[in-house]
């Protein structure tokens, strides 16, 4: 921001712009979550506003990493629609980025086996701007 611009805008807007600059440079903190035990064939919906209230000032988060160390396959759906619908096989890690995330759904794909507590870890973050995003104006 230029010094003249800093003098013109009110303090609350300056604070908001400084926070936006910091988020663009460094991203948000990493928000992690261990998936609880989920019965076979059951879907569980999570909203970032209720699960991570501190993430509200960084929304939308745009990066998610799912580590499936369980013996069952799970399905990940983002934002309640079928635009992003990923099958995550047992024993794999999936990273999705450049997709705005406000909520997600995890579905146990097995017909008989429940997921185990502390076997599936989900991490979310808003990534800092890289040179490509700056050039595209995002």
Image (tube, helix red, strand yellow):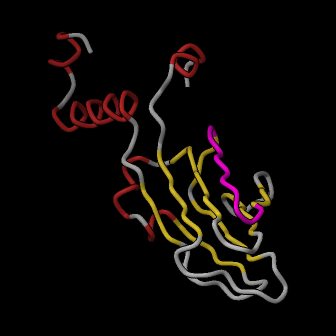
Q: Residue furthest right?
A: 111
Query: Residue 16 is drawn in which quadrant?
Result: top left
Quarter holding the N terminus is: top left
Instruction: State yes or no: residue 96 in magenta.
Output: yes
Instruction: State yes or no: residue 72 in magenta.
Output: no
Q: Is residue 7 left or right of residue 50?
A: left
Residue sitting at 65 percent across and 78 percent down? 44
The relative height of residue 122 versus residue 34 in the rendered view (above or below) is above
The relative height of residue 37 versus residue 118 in the rendered view (above or below) is below
Name the residue nearer the viewer: 111 or 71: 71
Residue sitting at 16 percent across and 33 percent down? 11
The relative height of residue 61 versus residue 92 in the rendered view (above or below) is above
Name the residue nearer the viewer: 94 or 132: 94
Quarter holding the C terminus is: top right
How far across and down, in percent of the image, does residue 102 sit? 56, 57
Name the residue nearer the viewer: 56 or 86: 86
Q: Main secondary structure of the magenta part?
A: strand
How far across and down, in percent of the image, does residue 56 sit? 40, 55
The relative height of residue 6 versus residue 52 in the rendered view (above or below) is above
Give the number of marks.
0
Q: Is residue 31 left or right of residue 14?
A: right
How far across and down, in percent of the image, does residue 65 sit? 58, 52
Q: Is residue 99 left or right of residue 54?
A: right
Name the residue nearer the viewer: 109 or 92: 92
How far across and down, in percent of the image, does residue 99 sit? 64, 43
Query: Residue 32 is drawn in which quadrant?
Result: bottom left
Magenta stretch in the rendered image: 89-98
Residue sitting at 44 percent across and 70 percent down? 50
Q: Is residue 49 left or right of residue 4?
A: right
Residue sitting at 80 percent across and 58 percent down? 82
């Amino acid at each position: 921001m230029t010094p003249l611009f800093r003098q013109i805008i009110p303090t609350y807007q300056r604070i908001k712009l400084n926070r936006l600059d910091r988020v663009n440079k460094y991203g948000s903190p990493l928000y992690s979550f261990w998936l609880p035990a989920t019965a076979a064939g059951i879907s569980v919906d999570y909203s970032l506003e209720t699960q991570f209230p501190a993430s509200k000032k960084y929304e939308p988060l745009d990066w998610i990493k799912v580590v499936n160390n369980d013996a069952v396959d799970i399905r990940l759906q983002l934002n309640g629609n079928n635009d992003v619908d990923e099958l995550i096989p047992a024993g794999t890690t999936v990273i999705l980025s450049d997709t705005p995330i406000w909520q997600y759904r995890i579905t146990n794909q097995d017909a008989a086996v429940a997921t185990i507590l502390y076997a599936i870890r989900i991490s979310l973050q808003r990534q800092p701007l890289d040179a490509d995003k700056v050039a595209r104006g995002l």
